[in-house]
Amino acid sequence: MITINGVTKAFGAKTLFENVSVQFTPQRRYGLTGPNGAGKSTFMKILQGDEDPNRGSVSVPKKIGILRQDQFRYNDVRIIDTVLMGNKTLWAALEERDKLYAEENLTDEMGLRLGELEGIIADENGYVAEQEAAELLQGIGIEESQHTELMNVLPNDLKFRVLLAQALFGGPEALLLDEPTNYLDLQSIHWLEETLINYSGTLVVISHDRHFLNSVCTHIADIDYETIIIYTGNYDDMVSAKTQSRGKIESENRDKQKKIAQLQEFVARFGAGTRSSQTQSRVKEIKRLEPTELKKSNIQRPYIRFEQKRPSGREVMVVKGISKSYPQNDGTTLKVIDDFSMTVTRGEKIGIIGNNGLGKTTLLQMFVGQLAPDGGTIETGHEATTGYFPQDYKQGIAPGMTAFAWLQSFSKEEGVEILRGLLGKMLFGGDSALKQTDTLSGGEAARLIMAKLMLEQNNVLVLDEPTNHLDLEAVSALAQALEKYQGTAIVVSHDRDLISQVATRIIALTDEGIADFAGTYEEYLDALKTDKPIARPKKIAATR
């Protein structure tokens, strides 16, 4: 159990939460929600012991699993050992035991200590620990052949997965996970959902993935109005209950205000007259009817709307037989895209899905001209203009500038008012527009790129994982904007709700190749279950 008692946290004049007392109990899975800036990550750091509250106390179990974000800390550690380190007691015992066994002359005292250590290792299931760690790694897509390699051989997204396995390892009494679905593909997200649903301890998780929260969570701890309120049910249940609760209070306050106005009119008319006792009674009634104070919500919703200066021709892009390969360290060549063809027509909303490493980003980079295919051609249609949201979008924002100056560098004739208006819609109001680009958070950087796309008014949008680091309100705003967009959109995303809401055509990258399906995401899933005809992929293999 995790117990929070009278916790307050503020930064300067801004109070995130005040005098909060809540309990997170075993066998319950809590989603920690709230808009960017509400204090989710700060509250999680307090639970982890990485940050102190201004007031109050926190009690957590001794054995706790934490998803760390420091991917580079374990660069010189074997991958499987990084996972084993998730059980600190076991890892300390294993290290001490190995040092003692390395001694040439064991003393009696050392022998006794070895016996104690073997007991600790047995209590912590240490003799099957490597097998359990290997199963976790395989579940999140780390091949067995890599388990004994050093962490520094992995790209950052796979390092993050190893840290997720570390948090899950060793049967922790409580799990604290901050954005665990970042860098996970759909298959790994499904695996994580199943793992967490079967977890019997206390789970507290932050995620911008609404589908994930709805699948996993039994309760939602929502940070808003400078407090934390726990709702029973998943994310959608919380939104409904929160809306109803606030609506009820607002309705009651309106009724109270109406009644107060009537009573005040009576008091004003007869206050000094013969009905003084009735007047006093009504004054007391006015005090009793004091409306319930409603603190201002922290929720801020960006306004995203993509326009196009002019429509493209009917054929937006014609792809003919493109291929792309990458050389491997062992001398082989990995062909990720092989003889792929497609025609994109005006107004299509294409969702590109598939596990990591199968070439989704490579495909988009070829579409926008950042990568040249090894073979085949890509022809851009008449009047087609493309706006691109890269997966590593923060690297595309020049440092040493204000957000306003960076956006202005893409402006041709738009004045200050238009640029300020765009930034305001993306929650860069007032002095926020003068924030240095070096200091932008992931969510702020993503919203700044969105402002650029809105400014450019392209008729084709190519978006690579645009929901990473966006809060749920921004993800919802993006989905609605793409739905209403009159141009053509090609979107890579692991956010199932976004793909489900937006896509009218699915391109699925699989181990066997690329499948092209004309229909929605749900229709695609149904077709897989019922063996309905899909443009089936060809087998792709590594070639020497």
Image (cartoon, rainbow, N blue to C red):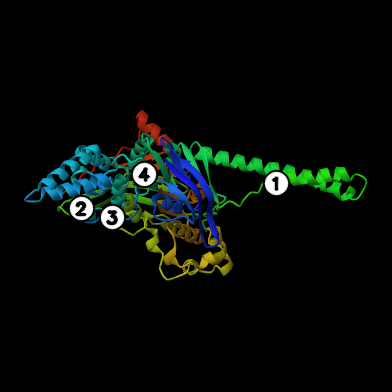
**Amino acid at dot 3:** Pro
Does label 4 or label 1 sit earlier along the sequence?
Answer: 1
Is residue 369 found left or right of 329 in the rendered image?
right
Residues at marks 3 and 4, CA–CA distance in whole angstroms: 20 Å
Look at discs 2 and 4 and give the one toward the viewer: 2
Say if mark 1 contacts mark 2, CB within 8 Å.
no
Image point (39%, 61%), residue name: 394
Residue corresponding to mark 2: 150
Residues at marks 1 and 2, CA–CA distance in whole angstroms: 62 Å
Q: Quadrant of the N terminus?
A: top left
Residues at marks 2 and 3, CA–CA distance in whole angstroms: 32 Å
Could you tell me residue 143's position as x and y percent?
22, 44
Residue corresponding to mark 3: 373
Given residues 318 and 225, the one toward you in this image is: 225
Residue corresponding to mark 4: 353
Image point (54%, 59%), residue name: 14
Residue corresponding to mark 1: 291
**Amino acid at dot 1:** Pro
Q: Mark 3 packing: few (<14 Cα in 10 Å), some, or many (20+)?
A: many
Say if mark 3 contacts mark 1, CB within 8 Å.
no
Is residue 321 found left or right of 502 in the rendered image?
left
Given residues 278 and 404, the one toward you in this image is: 278
- The extreme front residue here reads 108
- Say what secondary structure mark 2 lies in: loop
- The extreme left residue here reads 104
**Amino acid at dot 2:** Leu
Look at discs 4 and 1 and give the one toward the viewer: 1
